[in-house]
Image (cartoon, grey):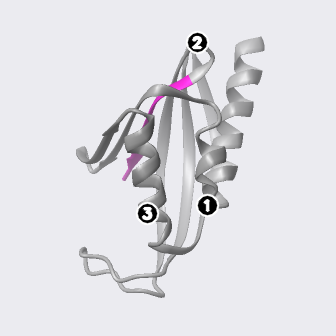
Amino acid sequence: MGDHKRYRSKIENYILAYNNFNVDEMLRDVHEDLTFQNVTNGEITLRTQGIEEFKNQAEMTKALFQEREQKIGVMRFHGDVVEVEIDYTALLAKDLSSGLKAGEIIHLKGKSVFVFKDDKILSITDLSF
């Protein structure tokens, strides 16, 4: 049960930092070999390898949003893997190549899968439907 509490705390910290556009705090509990993937409708739309690549991507994407919020739903623990249901809302600051315009609000439901190693977040996979 101790792992569950620690993992929950690290995930909550990461998501709070994400919501607050605080990249340094997002990285606090991240393993230096972090793998990040964003998967939409079964296709990988973004993949980073290593903490520096992830940090650069996170810094770049901050400018896309005026506001953003991930709300945590149910967490499911499977050893060192935690699945988190996420409700995501964001207000765009810029037009996107997908055709979405600045000022539009995005609503997504999905889940994030966090894998831990050495008490750090080794991988994050964001899945949206």
Mark 3 residue crowding within 10 angstroms, few (<14) / some (14–19) / many (20+): few
- Which amino acid type corresponds to the residue marked 1 in the rendered image? Phe
Residue at horizontal 50%, vertical 65%?
62
Mark 2 residue crowding within 10 angstroms, few (<14) / some (14–19) / many (20+): few
Residue with the mark numbered 1: 21
Q: Position of residue 21 (x, y in %)?
A: 61, 61
- In three-dimensional space, the C-alpha distance between marks 2 and 1, rounded to whole angstroms, equals 26 Å
Residue with the mark numbered 3: 61
Q: Position of residue 28 (x, y in %)?
A: 65, 36
Q: Position of residue 41 (x, y in %)?
A: 27, 50
Circle 3 SS class: helix
What span is in magenta?
Answer: 121-129
- In three-dimensional space, the C-alpha distance between marks 2 and 3, rounded to whole angstroms, equals 28 Å
Q: Image quadrant of residue 49?
A: top left
Dot 1 and dot 3 residues touching (CB under 8 Å): no
Circle 1 SS class: loop
Residue with the mark numbered 2: 118
Residue 91 among magenta residues: no
Residue at horizontal 63%, vertical 17%?
119
| Viewport quadrant of the N terminus | top right
**Would you say 13 lies left or right of 89 here?**
right
Instruction: Indicate which disc, 2 or 3, sits on the residue closer to the N terminus.
Output: 3
In this view, 12 is above or below 122 = below
In this view, 27 is above or below 107 = above
- Which amino acid type corresponds to the residue marked 2 in the rendered image? Asp
Residue at horizontal 25%, vertical 44%?
42
**Would you say 6 lies left or right of 41 here?**
right
- The residue lying toward the viewer, choosing from 48 and 73, is 48
